Image (cartoon, rainbow, N blue to C red):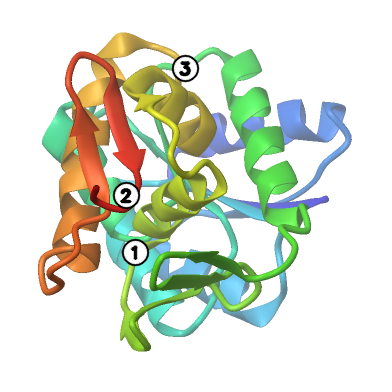
């Protein structure tokens, strides 16, 4: 598996590279955002580890540039910022996961493997629930034949709902399955993203499909 690490602190970059190579990965390094974008567009990678604070082009702008150029390689953001707004900004840019510094290297490896595994896993045929269709191959979503533009994380959240319809899903379950997080403080992010998804999936339609289950979490079901 081939990983691109975009990190301007060369000692940190070398540490990550050495550790990942010991885990069996092939690792390339870039030390600024522009170099990272050019490398990611020049050759395919299985994962990009992207620092947020980078010279020439910051990490979030680099991710947005890649997504605008249809580079869908999974991205794990590395940053010292851990406020909810910072995490949401990182995910909104098109990143797939978010790891705050300082981090345990074992956690970095675990998240790296999880993102690569998730990306390479064949998700199978098109999913349908009520009048929503989700195509796991193209990552496109339609409701009543109207295409819905979703961010990477909104798509993953909807896919989890559609693979588990009519089931009450706790915030912890969602955090573990969609973000690979297991701690309770992350549930604020779940609420933010469910609200984002509701606005896109339900707001312009009479039939609301995403519902709150008081004291539990959320459920995808047709109204009674």
Is there any visible trace of residue 193 in the rendered image? no
- Does the CB distance between marks 1 and 2 fall below 8 Å? yes
Q: Nearer the viewer, mark 1 or mark 2?
A: 1
Task: Give the Cα distance between marks 1 and 2.
Answer: 8 Å
Q: Nearer the viewer, mark 1 or mark 3?
A: 1
Task: Give the Cα distance between marks 2 and 3.
Answer: 18 Å
> Measured from the top left, where is residue 205 in percent x and y?
15, 72
Q: Secondary structure at mark 1?
A: loop
Which residue in the rendered view is the most extreme toward the right? 24
Disc on res. 91: 2
Task: Give the Cα distance between marks 1 and 3.
Answer: 26 Å
Q: Earlier in the sequence, mark 1 or mark 2?
A: 2
Q: Is 112 positioned to the left or the right of 103 in the image?
A: right
From the viewer's perspective, is residue 163 above or below residue 184? below
Q: Secondary structure at mark 3?
A: loop
> Measured from the top left, where is residue 157 in percent x and y?
41, 48
> Measured from the top left, where is residue 74 in percent x and y?
57, 55
Q: Name which residue lies at 29% across and 66% down.
A: 61
Looking at the image, which is closer to me, 208 or 155?
Answer: 208
Q: Name which residue lies at 44% across and 33% down.
A: 167
Question: Residue beneath label 1, please?
Answer: 151
Q: Earlier in the sequence, mark 1 or mark 3?
A: 3
Q: Nearer the viewer, mark 2 or mark 3?
A: 2
């Amino acid at each position: 598996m081939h990983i691109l690490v975009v990190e301007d602190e060369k000692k940190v970059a070398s540490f990550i590279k050495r550790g990942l190579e010991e885990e069996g990965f092939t690792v390339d390094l870039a030390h600024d955002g522009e170099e990272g974008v050019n490398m990611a567009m020049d050759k395919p990678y299985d994962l990009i580890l992207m620092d947020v604070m980078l010279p020439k082009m910051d990490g979030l702008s680099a991710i947005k540039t890649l997504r605008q150029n249809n580079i869908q390689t999974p991205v794990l953001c590395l940053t010292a910022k851990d406020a909810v707004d910072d995490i949401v900004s990182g995910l909104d840019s098109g990143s797939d996961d978010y790891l705050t510094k300082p981090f345990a290297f074992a956690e970095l490896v675990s998240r790296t493997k999880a993102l690569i595994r998730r990306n390479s896993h064949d998700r199978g045929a098109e999913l349908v629930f009520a009048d929503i269709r989700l195509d796991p191959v193209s990552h496109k979503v339609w409701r009543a034949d109207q295409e819905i533009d979703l961010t990477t994380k909104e798509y993953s959240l909807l896919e989890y709902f559609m693979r588990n319809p009519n089931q009450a899903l706790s915030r912890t379950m969602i955090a573990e399955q969609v973000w690979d997080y297991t701690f309770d403080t992350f549930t604020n992010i779940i609420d933010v993203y469910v609200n984002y998804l509701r606005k896109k999936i339900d707001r312009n339609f009479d039939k609301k499909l995403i519902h709150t289950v008081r004291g539990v979490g959320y459920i995808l079901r047709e109204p009674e």
